[in-house]
Amino acid sequence: FFFEYHCFIFMDVAVFAQQFGQAGFQQPRGQQFAEQGLDRDYEEKTTSAIPANVRMISGCQDAQTSADVSNIAQFGLPPNAGPGGAGGACTCSFLTAMGQNPSPTWLDLLASIRGVLSQKGFTQIPEMSSSRRMDLAGRFEIQSEAGGKQRALIVGINYIGMKGELRGCCNDAKSIKVFLQQRGFRDFRVLTDDGQGDASPTKQNILDGFKWLVDGAKAGDSLFFHYSGHGGSLKAEAEDEKDGKDETLVPLDYKKAGQIRDNAILKALVLPLPRGCQLTALMDCCHSGTVMDLPYMFTASDANMQTAQANLAQTGTAHVPINADFNLNYTLRMVQDVLANVSTMLNGMGLGGMMGGINL
């Protein structure tokens, strides 16, 4: 079943890779597609490269830091929202916004998060990125209408006793678990460094958590990933980043094991998901705007919010813009790497024919 499952996930992507991979693209980045008015072409190619419906809310832009709050009482969360005490500004703003309006549109949610952050004196600007050309006028929901399984990976790291220790990340993990339980989620893996999670948030445990989250995923499933901890940026390992930096998650053992780069997140958490599966991510960390490297992105700045509201008033829609820095060529090469690994496994088991004769 494992091999058959992976074959069917990647079959349409394999056809796409075979069709476009050798020839390459004349428009490798989102900006070039947008400038030439090739929105539909971009949508077709990115949907083939990333079949699943992936949506991420980040607490700040790549160049910004995200705040750790000493006392979340100022956010006015309900008594049953979590343990209280310290917490991350993004997580608390998200929970406050959802408490005020449990069924918001994406635009309403981002406006509310931005408003709460601003009201509390935080300058960070939230962003929303996605694998689809989503309409911000659509409802924010974490559960697919198809009614599949619901599973969540939650990571909170306080770096207890370490330089740069945080105070609220493990509380964030508890609060998000409560939020998801109230919405029907029952299958969790929680990684925290306070001794109260399922395991410690080491690099290997987080990567294993990615595998657990996507394992057996199918159309109709609803997955959720929450991260609260340090985020960073490192010199890019490849030429896929326009700013020359990879955005990162900082695991508990980062000094020994290293950080988790955005490319690794895309490869392990996004690309393996099948068409029709939905993943929602909430990233409460610094430098997190493009930490999942998705092809569409909306920055909730004042100017962008005004433009979206104007579009909504005029046309009834407000679509998430193309991520100008998204590198389609590099994503395709990552898809081909994943496909090659699957093909090698299948050939080793004498099951190479399951790839339908596609040569990678």
Image (cartoon, rainbow, N blue to C red):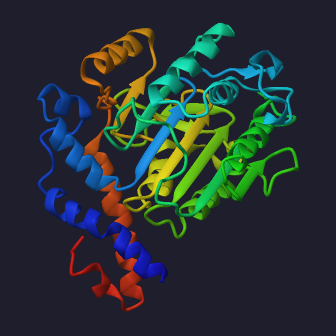
x, y percent for residue 322: 29, 31
x, y percent for residue 20: 16, 56
Q: Is residue 359 above or below residue 179?
A: below
Q: Is residue 240 above or below residue 15?
A: above
Residue 289 in the figure: left or right of residue 210: left
Question: Which quadrant: the C terminus?
Answer: bottom left
Residue 309 seen from this side: yes
x, y percent for residue 273: 44, 60
Residue 158 seen from this side: no
Residue located at (31% from left, 84% from top):
354
Residue 39 in the figure: left or right of residue 207: left
x, y percent for residue 187: 69, 61
Q: Quadrant of residue 258?
A: top right
Q: How many marks?
A: 0
Residue located at (54% from left, 23% from top):
60
Front residue of 51 and 167: 51
Front residue of 167 and 282: 282
Q: Quadrant of residue 348?
A: bottom left
Residue located at (22% from left, 49% from top):
45
Residue located at (67% from left, 33% from top):
230
Residue 277 in the figure: left or right of residue 28: right
Q: Is residue 330 above or below residue 109?
A: below
